[in-house]
Amino acid sequence: MRRRSPLLLVLAASLGPSSALAAEWLPAGTAISRPADVEVQARALTSLDLSAVSTLPSPAGSVVRLTQRHRGVPVLGRALAVRVSGGRVSGTRGAPARGLTVDVTPAITPALAVTLAARSLDRPGSAGDASLGVVPTSAGGRLVYRVETAARGGFVVDVDARSGDVLQRRPSRLHASGRVYAISSEVTPKPVDLTLPSLDVDSPQHLIGFSGGVSVFEYAGANPDGTYKVTQTIEADADGNFLFDPPKNPLDEHDPFAAVNAFFHIGRARTFYADTLGVEMSSARWPLAVVVNVLEDGGSLDNAAFSPQALASKSGKKNTIIIGQGSETDFAYDSDVFLHEFQHYMAHNAIGYGQGQLGFDEWGYNPFTGAIDEGTADYFACTINGDSTLGEASLAPLGAVRDLSEDGQRCVDDLVGEVHEDGKLVGNLTWRVREVLGKDRADAVVWGALSMLDETASLGDFARALTGAVGDLVAGGGATQAEADAISALVTARGLDDCDRVLSIDGGKRREISTLGLSYIGSLFGASCSDVIGYGFALTLPFQLSATATAPYYELTIGSPGGPTGAGKTQLLVRKGDRVTYSQGSMGQLKPDAFDAAIELTTQKKVLLGTPESGVAITPGETYYFSIMHQSCGFHSTWTVEGKSLTEPGGAAGAGGAAGGAGAAGRGGLAGRAGGGGRAGAAAAEAVPVEVTGGCNCRASGAEGGQGLALGALSALALVAARRRATAARARR
């Protein structure tokens, strides 16, 4: 049941016997059969344009609130209230304005009114909304524009609609206190009372702020379509404050403290990005709903997530952050959680960045944008809170705490394909950059680097964007060359100077690439690997390989020592001169799009290219690109790839042995012939060509729309993926 607001109870109790003035427009005792009759009676008795706008509960009936208009324009400051009890008017508050004669034709435009309001606040250029209103005066009223702007934290400014004079200004923020953990229940375990940032004036007072840009809701259940039922029952006390203590049981699902803590820390994050990084957040794409105490299938949810979709049912907000009611603790008690998810929200809305775990582009599966997104979200959470450890109160009980100061990861060898694990490399690099440059410069550099990326980015792209931003600082005198050199050394030490989407295997390089299997992908959606294969789904290795031929034949050795089990098909796709490209079907299935040959592979395979059977002609001096598309089951597998050019099929012949004896086999080649009786060496395995529809060196029809279709098909499942992250992580340990 919705708890009645203390403010509403005070209002209802104060509606005493009608005054003489009130009796002129709606006398006490007037019969009211239903709340809608209040408007009818009020209009009939006053001959004024009065409209009922809401009906609120009162202890003994209801309160109907009305507004007044003059020639179609709202009359400001004339909110009227009528208490109805027992089918009759029992009290009124307020009185309609009489004698209004003002002309409602403005002499200035709404845009000019916004400009004048912004200038009066010393914030020229600030956006705002202007609407006409009539202010009652003894001279028949005054026509004004009421301008609402987010400038200086939120102001309401009245501008004369004829002269342009600024008449009054007042902040739309409410200075109220909330009881919160300054950082988290673990780092700062004693709750403190702090000012809630930019709380909007509301009646009853809820956790809504930043001119409607942020609203905190409580979880009230799940809808069949995957959205959440939400409520806003938490209201301020009689003094306008939100001073709730944490519940004795931290797993209590009905926890107003969690909602207040959420609003405070989301406000901290928003203020940081607006004031420190200068991000403008006033446009229509920014409104955010935060839902606390979220459950999964009626049980605990050890996670938090951001979605760019309106998952909070009927909230009217285009973005949603959900905070789980965990099995060990309430995730809302750890500000690291809010700050991390808020960075995802920022990356999506300010940059249009981030595909999560299931990132695909025209070159195949790309988990690296997700890893960059996760790593930078860790960084900004830690830099705002001022320590390198993420999740002391939320992740630590699950054994999943992340420490950005831990070195040791390198690209490519230590990447596993899971975005949180691989994101540690980004988090560690950026934290070390912070140690070189200090907080303020590092924050700007990391944000500037992220701002340069799109959804095809590699970890190498991020490293270059980072060093490029530092280079700009040096050029502008904001950093020294020694600092720039130190950061370049950090990049190199982590292998990020050779971490692009294409890895060269020239010079005998052996590449080891780890990737997730379809069992992991299926677990995100409650499906088995065989189910996923049945849908026609496949993954590519996240890296393609390249080699420049020096002879007319090329031999690839490809293996998965870990051995994917229960696998479907695995194919090697080859293309001369450019990367293999893919498009996606309506369910997100990858389809090879531009390639020269597709070759079926076994778990351990040597593939000889340049023969007629391979379908690939090798031209010395040309560069060839290789992509592996697989349906490997299991949660994880590691692949190895190496290659070499050969002058003959199977390699150079070995020198012949003595007559009648065995000729020594050439390395990886055929038996030497000179000896006549030479025993054959190990032959390279034949390539088995596989027909793939559309296999030409071109883009298939309709491929341009493939990525968008896949994202649309998977977007409804993206939150499910986020919600199962912790469960999947524990399963891998």
Image: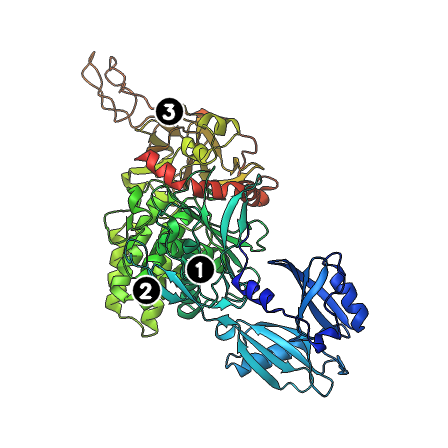
Question: Can the viewer see residue 227 in this picture?
Answer: yes
Q: Of the residues under marks 1 and 3, which one precedes in the sequence?
A: 1
- The residue positioned 76% from the left and 56% from the top of the image is 33
- Who comes first in sequence, dot 1 or dot 2? 1
**Image quadrant assignment for residue 203:** bottom right
Name the amino acid, label 3: Thr
- Count of picture labels: 3
Q: Left or right: 79 with respect to 302?
A: right
As drawn, is 102 to the left or to the right of 494? right
Q: Looking at the picture, which amino acid does disc 1 mark?
A: Phe
Under mark 2, the amino acid is Ala
Foreground: disc 1 or disc 3? 1
Work out how far the residue at label 3 is from the one at label 2, CA to CA, in angstroms: 45 Å
- Position of 444 with respect to 403 (left or right) is right
Mark 3 = which residue?
565
**Is residue 223 or residue 56 the one in the foreground?**
56
Residue at the (40%, 60%) spot, across then down: 265
Sequence-first disc among 3 and 2: 2
Give the spatial CA distance, label 1 vs label 3: 47 Å
Q: In which quarter of the image is residue 412?
A: top left
Circle 1 is placed at which residue position?
263
* Crowding near the residue tagged with mark 2, few <14, some 14–19, many ≥20 C-alpha atoms within 10 Å: many
Position of residue 466 measured from the top left corner of the image (x, y, whole percent): 35, 60
Which residue sits at x=24%, y=52%? 493
**Local SS, label 1:** helix
Write down the residue under mark 2.
442
